[in-house]
Image: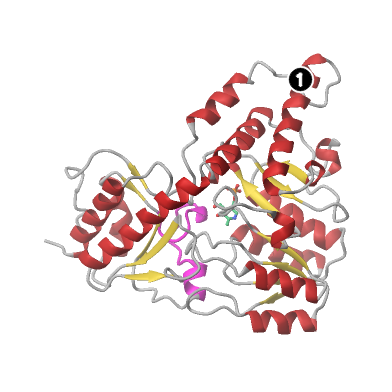
């Protein structure tokens, strides 16, 4: 009989290290959203309440546009990253005439699933760029695919949500330009973490989700350049200049803009703090757990907020997360977006990670402390050496 060990005596305070799944809402964001609740008008109404709400939405759009270095007219609010990715991919296939899509097996389901449907129902062709065991794309193979299909749509994520691996953006955007391809990137994990001058980086289409940078859930945006607008994925009224129907979620949009502003003001400080937590975690895990490994290019091009740990074989994968949960520690196995399923991660499988070794994704946020990382490593080390 397997017994779930109770580590609850070690530390009862909640330790949240699952910031790639979602982040706590910043108190100043909540305050900004609450302040505007009395402006309840529909931004499409022409009367005073409607006009007040419209002003707030357009202010938020200008804030986002300035930070992303695009025109306000190129920012469209959505319900989040999933919708934004879907809208762009469907729009590119159905309205902009793209027939060849180049992507990788390491993408988030919010990209892989729409591509699967587009292949099935719209007859597009999907080509997968080779990736290596560290989780990097092969630029030479990308160039070969682009040579065969110039003018394709390339969809490659900026940072992988499971491993934190970063895309060589300059290389990809250079290749896209060389072969007249359009470049869509799922930037959900990086917007709010890095300065993002979208045109300078070479992204044609980018997406964001507010709840990944201490904003509210259920709101995001897509950046779409003038000249590449498409018909709305969500059809109905003429909101968002005919790019996304549905009454705008005004408080959430205000919260998104506030959260993005805060993330940019604090960016340098947050990067230093979070990087130090990730380095400490790697060092402590190596010191305390024999045979520990890391999935992805942990010492190379990697997002500071994400660490994917491969634990030794003697650790029971099924009990690991429940035990951590009982100890008040929130982390993820692989990707939390698969609704907590125990299915093997498609990302780790594509990277040929040994499926018998349990993996956990630890993802850090600005609110985390070194003491929390030490407690996590303590619990993992206890679990690695059963009594
Ligand atoms: N893309 C990536 C890389 C993600 O990590 C996520 C969420 O985890 C999404 C898309 C989906 O975003 P949303 O939760 O806003 O729909």
Q: Please count the marks in the image.
A: 1
Q: Quadrant of the N terminus?
A: bottom left
Q: Which residue is mark 1?
A: 52
Q: Position of residue 161 (x, y in %)?
A: 52, 59
Magenta run includes residue 333: yes
* Other residues around mark 1 within 10 Å, as few (<14) / some (14–19) / many (≥20): some
Question: Under 8 Å from ligand 1: the CB of mark 1?
Answer: no
Q: Is residue 50 above or below residue 77?
A: above
Q: Residue drawn at (77%, 25%), measured in percent from left and top?
A: 55
Residue 218's spot in the image, x, y percent? 61, 39
Image quarter where the C terminus lies is bottom left
Q: Which residues are magenta?
A: 332-350
Left or right of 127, for residue 276: left
Q: Quadrant of residue 258?
A: top right
Q: Position of residue 361 (x, y in %)?
A: 40, 59
Residue 139 located within the stretch drawn in magenta: no
Q: Helix, strand, or loop for circle 1? A: helix
Looking at this rendering, what residue extends furthest in the left direction? 387
Identify whether 53 is placed above or below 148: above
Kindly identify the residue that appears in the image at 80 percent across and 76 percent down: 179
Residue 3 horizontal side relative to residue 175, left or right: left
């Amino acid at each position: 009989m397997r017994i779930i060990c109770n580590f609850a005596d070690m530390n009862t305070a909640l330790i949240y290290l699952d910031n790639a799944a979602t982040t706590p809402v910043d108190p100043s964001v909540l305050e900004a959203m609450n302040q505007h609740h009395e402006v309840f008008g529909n931004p499409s109404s022409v009367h005073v309440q409607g006009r007040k709400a419209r002003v707030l939405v357009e202010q938020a759009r200008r804030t986002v546009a300035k930070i992303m270095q695009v025109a306000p007219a190129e920012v469209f609010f959505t319900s989040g990253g999933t919708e934004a990715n879907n809208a762009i991919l469907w729009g590119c296939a159905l309205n902009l005439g793209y027939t060849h899509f180049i992507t990788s097996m390491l993408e988030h389901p919010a990209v892989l699933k729409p591509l699967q449907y587009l292949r099935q129902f719209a007859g597009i062709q999907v080509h997968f760029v080779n990736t290596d065991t560290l989780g990097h794309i092969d630029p030479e193979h990308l160039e070969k695919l682009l040579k065969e299909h110039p003018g394709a749509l390339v969809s490659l994520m900026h940072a992988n949500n499971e491993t934190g691996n970063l895309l060589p953006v300059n290389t990809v955007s250079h290749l896209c330009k060389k072969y007249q391809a359009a470049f869509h990137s799922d930037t959900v994990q990086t917007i709010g973490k890095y300065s993002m001058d979208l045109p300078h980086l070479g992204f044609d289409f980018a997406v964001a989700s507010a709840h990944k940078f201490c904003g509210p859930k259920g709101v995001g945006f897509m950046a779409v350049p003038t000249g590449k607008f498409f018909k709305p994925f969500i059809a109905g009224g003429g909101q968002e200049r005919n790019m996304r129907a549905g009454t705008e979620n005004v408080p959430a949009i205000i919260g998104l803009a506030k959260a993005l502003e805060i993330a940019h003001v604090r960016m340098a400080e947050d990067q230093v703090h979070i990087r130090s937590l990730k380095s400490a975690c790697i060092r402590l895990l190596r010191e305390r757990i024999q045979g520990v490994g890391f999935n992805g290019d942990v010492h190379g091009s990697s997002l500071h907020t994400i660490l994917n740990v491969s634990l030794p074989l003697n650790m029971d994968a099924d009990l690991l997360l429940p035990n951590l949960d009982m100890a008040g520690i929130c982390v993820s196995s692989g990707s939390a977006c698969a609704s907590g399923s125990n299915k093997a991660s498609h990302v780790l499988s594509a990277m040929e990670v040994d499926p018998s070794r349990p993996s956990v994704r630890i993802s850090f946020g600005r609110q985390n402390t070194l003491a929390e990382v030490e407690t996590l490593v303590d619990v993992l080390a206890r679990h690695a050496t059963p009594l």
